[in-house]
Image (cartoon, helix red, strand yellow):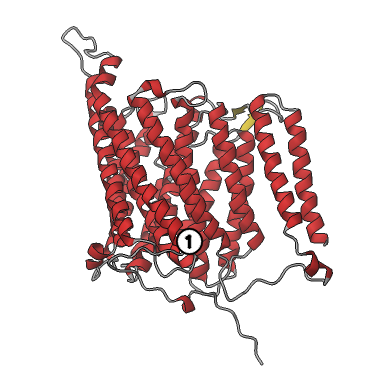
Amino acid sequence: METVLARAGWWSAALLIAVMAAAAAADSSFAVHMAIVAVAAGIGLWVSVSRADYGAIARGIIRAPADQGKYDDDPIRWGMIATMFWGMAGFLAGLFIALQLAYPQLNFEPYLNFGRVRPLHTSAVIFAFGGNALIATSFYVVQRTCRARLAFPGLARFVFWGYQLFIVLAATGYLMGVTQSKEYAEPEWYVDWWLTIVWVAYLAVFVGTIVKRSEPHIYVANWFYLAFILTVAMLHVVNNIDIPVSFVGSKSYPLFSGVQGALVQWWYGHNAVGFFLTAGFLAMMYYFVPKQAERPIYSYRLSIIHFWALIFLYIWAGPHHLHYTALPDWAQTLGMVFSVMLWMPSWGGMINGLMTLNGAWDKVRTDPIIRMMVMALAFYGMSTFEGPMMSVKSVNSLSHYTDWTIGHVHSGALGWNGMITFASVYYLVPRLWHRERLYSLRWVNWHFWLATLGIVFYAASMWVAGITEGLMWREYGADGYLVNSFAEVVAAVHPMYVLRAFGGLLYLSGATIMTANVWLTILGRQRQEAPLRQAAYDATADRPLVAVPAE
């Protein structure tokens, strides 16, 4: 009973503080956010009180002990559902802003203009879709590779629900215009503080599970997950050192300004790509590709070299975002050199993933999930060649500030991050819900082709648009004046903007099919169709190692 009362007391205190903060708010946006926190605390209070087993408590039993012979998969199941929900929201927002750029009359002031919906899209696809996928898969992988249950079950549930609260606060803030105006770091100070608390809890759960492992070896995927968690924590804290104007207001000012602020921001921004969108998803690749292919990783030694080379080189490459700015020239060159060197370890990881299919290439023809993984690795290789190439100053003078950068980012995000996440979700859902197979493997095939065609339309149109913009902006006439006005350049690339929106529509259509497929699989249904290959699964081996007490 004391535990229930203590938990109810914590929730009541949080509810009271949130209500008081909303009442004393210096601006309406902060009041709305504190009202959201109050609602979340109220729900937590209701769940704590209503779901307590008072009969068991009366008998002196606080909670029935968890089955130590099964993995703790509840937060992972929730994470799969959240990944699909936020993914659809992010893809829909992306299609909407693509249409806004092609047809400006779709900007609806003030809440649905491009300036507010664009960070909603980027945060939804990176932190909501990608973040939930990373948290869920890391909880799955660390348990299986350590042969141990999650270290702190209650804290793992706090991580999941606390992260959802962060997403809701960030998203509603964008639509209300509450933003620091920092790329990939838009949420204001109090949302940043909350995310820091959640992230420390995430680190504790992950490291605690590794510490209590039954397997002596720490598999390389866990190295990548740990690098992702630790480095993102460091980046987040340093880039979001802000001074609030008021502790009951939404506005703050950053500690760093000018060229120092720009360097810190792009140290954060580039390494958010490097450790959130690369290292974390490489961890997914190193676990799920061998599992689906039923082959060991091609070279474990190469995976270790890949890991250490990548995390050492990536952290130095941020200045390539600031070529031809007030940043000192030596710092720009340093970023360029490390960016070019990054090509080698990146391709080492791609080769390791692809070569894992040695002797199993026929599965690319028969297994659409493997096909997605191969396509993800192909886009990873292409993006990690294109990025270093674009960091070279002579290339950057043409590409920077153009839509070529947008094409580069989306070929990586849609092709690498999207495809490897889709494949991992397809692998996990039947196993987490104890289903024989997915509702339809042929729907996976449809998803693969719609997503691939969507990426081709998107990336190709942005490559053409970007090079067009770069060439038109730098064209001078015989009199020494620029030939093209900005409006003429926008008109020239308008067809490419329409093609981009079409590519986004195809990608969203594929994700819609996936959402239906996943949901019907959870419901336990199976489509009657000619069989495609499915990776083997042994339910009896999928359990933690538990020491048998001596008799």
Can the viewer see residue 128? yes
User: Residue, x 45% and y 53% (percent of image)?
Assistant: 280
Please tell me in which quadrant of the rendered image residue 34 appears.
top right
x, y (%) of residue 38?
Answer: 71, 40
Furthest residue in direction front, as rendered = 528
- 400 left or right, relative to 178: left
User: Residue, x 48% and y 59% (percent of image)?
Assistant: 137
Amino acid type for the residue under numbered disc 1: Leu
Q: Mark 1 points at which residue?
A: 523
User: Residue, x 21% and y 9% (percent of image)?
Assistant: 480
- 461 left or right, relative to 114: left
Crowd around label 1: few <14 · some 14–19 · many ≥20 (10 Å): few
In the picture, which quadrant includes the N terminus? bottom right
Furthest residue in direction bottom, as rendered = 551
User: Residue, x 25% and y 65% (percent of image)?
Assistant: 366
Residue nearest the observer in this picture, 235 or 202: 202
In the picture, which quadrant includes the C terminus? bottom right
